[in-house]
Image (cartoon, grey):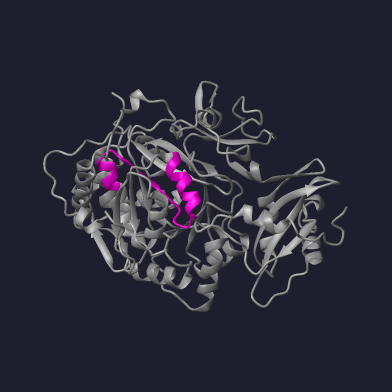
Amino acid sequence: MPPREWSLVGVHDVVAAEVPDRDMVVCGDTRRTFGEVARRTKSIAAFLGARGLGLRRERSELEPWECGQDPIALVMHNSVEYIEAMLGAYRARAVPFNVNQHYRPAEMRALFNDVGVRAVIYHRRYGPLVQAVSERLDVVLVDVDDGSGVPPLSGSTSFEDVVRTPVEGPLPVPSPDDLYMVCTGGTTGRPKAVLWRQADIYVSGMAGTDDTTEESIIHAANAGAGASGPWYPVPPLMHAAAQWTAYSGLHQGATVVLHDDSGPFDAETVLTLAERERVVLMSIVGDAYAGPLVAELARRPYDLSSLVTIGTGGAATGEQHIKALLDHLPNLVIRDGYGASETGGMAYGARTKNSFRTGLAPSAGATVISADRSRFVEPGEAEIGWTARRGRVPLGYLGDRGRTEATFPVIDGHRVAIPGDRAQLSADGRILMLGRDSLVVNTGGEKVFVEEVEEVLRRHPDIADALVVGRPSDRFGQEVVAVVAPRKGATLDPDVIRRYVAGEIARFKAPRAVAVCQTVQRHANGKPDYRWAETVAATAQLVAGGDH
C-alpha cells in the first residue's frame, strides 16, 4: 500500500488534536492556540461555502496549468489572520494566494485578472487599493481591522464576524490534490502563479516526507520541533519562503511568531520580539535583513541564548554579515538555503563559528542537469548546467501551457522543475551555485554572474549594499555596471571600486561603470529590485580603465 498523502488542513488537524492548548501563532499582542485556529478556520470555511466559494472541478479533470478551485486574494501584512485565512480557504477547498500589498493598482489589477479572483481578504489600510482594483469585479470582500482607522469597503464583511459563522452540517473534505498557489515575480518580470498539489508542497517545502504518518506528526509535535521552541519567519508572509518556514514549524507543532511588517523593516523590533518569545529559529532574506540585524546587535546586547538557527535565503547574504552574526552569536548555526517557488527548498548549507564548507547539500530530488537540458549531470563534471528538482514538483503555471512545459519538462523519464539558476555538481554531490541565468552579463564573449560580483562588492568595508546589472555596450555587447550604497559616513570613489573588484576576481568581471546611491532599492521581501537598478545604471559614467 502506498504511503498516505496529506492535505495541509489534514496535517493541521492532527497537530491541533494533539496540542490544542499550545500557542500556534503569536503576532504583537495576539495569541491563538492550535485549537482556537482549528475552530475559527472551520467558521471561515462555512462562510466561504455559504457564498458559493470552493471547488469547481476535481484535479483529475484538469490540465496541469488549470485551476478548478475559487482563488482568494490575500492583501495582507503579517498577522495571525493571514494564517487563519489560508487554512480557512483550504478547508472550503478554495485556493488562497499571496498578493504583494505594495503593488500599484495596475499591477494588482493585472494579477487579479490573470488569476480570476473570486474573493479578497484584506487589511483595512489596503481598502482603497482593493477598491480601485476590484470595483468592477464580482468578488466577496472580507476586511481585517488593523487599527489603521480606515473604514471597511461597502459590502465587506469583517473577519471577526466571519469567524463567528456557525458551522451547520459537514464541511468539505480537503484533498491532497487540492492546490497550494503562490504568486512569484522573482527578481524580474510579471508575477506568475505557481500551482502545487498540497501533498507535493508539504514534502518539498513544508517539513513533510514521502512516508509521513499520523504517528510521526504526533511525535514531532510532542518531542521534535514543536517541543523545542518558537519559530520566527521574519519576512512577509506574502513571500513563499516565509510561508514555508511558518508551515514547516506548524506542521511539527511549533509556535510561529510573526511581527507586523506593514512598516519599514526595523531590526530593533525584530530582535526584541525574538528575545521576548525565546525563539529557537529565525528565517531572513539575505543582506537586506542581515545588515540591519548586525548593526543592531552591535548597538546593544540582546538575550538570544535560545536562538539556535538562522535560516537565510531568497537573496545573497554577504560573508561579512555571516561572520558578524557568528561573532555576536557564537553558538548559532546559519543555514543558507536555496530554493524557488517552482521547486520548494532544494539545497542547504550549514555554517558555524568554526566550520565552513563550499556548496550546498541537496534535498531529496535536487540535482543539476546539463546546459542543453537533455540529461542529469554526474557528480564532478565540469559542465555548468542548471539546477533542477525531480519528484514532487509543481503542476505548472496557471493559464500558461507553454511556460509550464518549458519549466517542467521530462528528462530521462523524470518530470523536473528547472527554476533558471546555473550551477555545477561537485564530486561529493554538493550543488555549487553560480547565479540566475537571467542575471548573467555577456561582456566581450565572457559570461559574468552578477551575484559573484555583488558578493565581492559587499565585502568592501565602505559599501553597505550593491547590485550589479548589464547594460548595452558598443564595444563589448554588454558591460557590467555596479549600483552601490555607502556605509554611513563613507565616501565611495568609482575608480577605487573597480580596482578593488579587479583585485579580487577576473578583471573582465569588474564594473566598467559605477553608480553611487544613498540606498539600494529592494522589494518588500528583501529581494533585489533589478529593474530599478537597470534604470539607475543606464546613466552611470564609465570609470577609469572601464573602456578596456
x, y (%) of residue 265? 48, 66
- Viewed as shown, does residue 133 lie left or right of 531? left
Q: Which residues are magenta?
A: 87-114
- Residue drawn at (59%, 50%) of the image: 357
- Residue drawn at (42%, 57%) of the image: 129
- Viewed as shown, does residue 209 lie left or right of 540? left
- Viewed as shown, does residue 315 lie left or right of 280? right
**Magenta span contains residue 96:** yes
Instruction: Give the vertical position of 97 relative to 327 (above or below).
Output: above
x, y (%) of residue 341? 48, 43
x, y (%) of residue 101? 44, 56
- Residue drawn at (31%, 25%) of the image: 2
Relative depth, front residue between 137 and 501: 137
Relative depth, front residue between 442 and 353: 442
Instruction: Give the vertical position of 26 relative to 335 (above or below).
Output: below
Instruction: Give the vertical position of 27 relative to 74 (above or below).
Output: below
